[in-house]
Amino acid sequence: MKALSLLHGIRYVDSFFPAGGFAYSSGLEAAVQRGAVKDSQGFALYVEDFFQSGLGRREAVAVARAWQGARGKGREAQEADQELDAMMTGRESRQASKQMGRQVLRGALVDEDASPVVREYLREVEAGRAAGHLAVALGLVLGEAGWTREQTVTAFLYQQSVGFVSASLKLLPIGQREGQRLLASWAPMISRLSRQAVADTAMTAWTPVQDIYAMKHSRLASRLFRS
């Protein structure tokens, strides 16, 4: 990857980018409050199961398929967006994904020479003709930035893992050093899931535990996060 392509794309997965990911815990807050996740070990199991049974087999595949949209096959992105929207049963999780995706697309238009593909897709999203999920938005903008398909999927999964660790620092007795240890330990899993997502064409997911806690989040007595 050329340095300029790296710089054009890396800001979208940086925690500094204003996509709003810091406001969401993807059900982790409810799992902690209900006692399902109590420490670093339980947190690692929660995240690893979610990645291997959900994010790595559904959203990661959506990223790979949306990446094709940046190669002139816009229909790939729209179909992945529609399928992902139908598969996300939890209202809060679905809304969070769409909110962050819209912010990514809007952020891509800051550049005067922004991609016509991304510009057109944002119009579809704002007109209500496309959902604009985060996975699809990142697939488009990183593809347009010149990243390979596997690099794009890897970046998405890494961004998600960082989001979980960031939330865990506020919810659990986990320090920054332990958070970095977990990120390092997940690297092989992220690499493997990225390769599989690139080769796959079907989105699948089975994450009942995480889905249930995400649905319970709105009924918590006190909340730090929006999901």
Image (tube, rainbow, N blue to C red):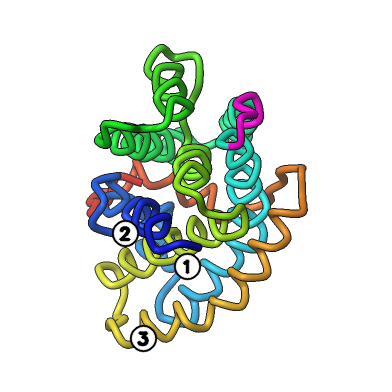
| Predominant secondary structure, magenta span | helix
Question: Which residue matches tag 3?
Answer: 178
SS state under label 3: helix
The residue closer to the viewer here, 171 or 55, is: 55
Do the residues bearing badges 2 and 3 touch, measured as CB atoms within 8 Å? no
Query: Which is closer to the viewer, label 2 or label 3?
Result: 2
What amino acid type is highlighted by mark number 2?
Asp
The residues bearing labels 2 and 1 have C-alpha atoms spaced at a distance of 29 Å
* Segment colored magenta: 71-76
- Judged by depth in the image, the label closer to the viewer, 1 or 3, is 3
* 181 relative to 74, above or below: below
Q: At x 42% / y 52%, what residue is drawn?
A: 26
Quadrant in the picture for residue 38: bottom left
Q: Which residue is mark 1?
A: 36
Toward the viewer: 128 or 205?
A: 128
Residue highlighted by disc 2? 14
**Residue sitting at x 66%, y 30%:** 76
Q: Point out residue 152 in the picture as x, y percentages from the top left corner.
A: 53, 54
Asked whether residue 165 is drawn in magenta, I would say no
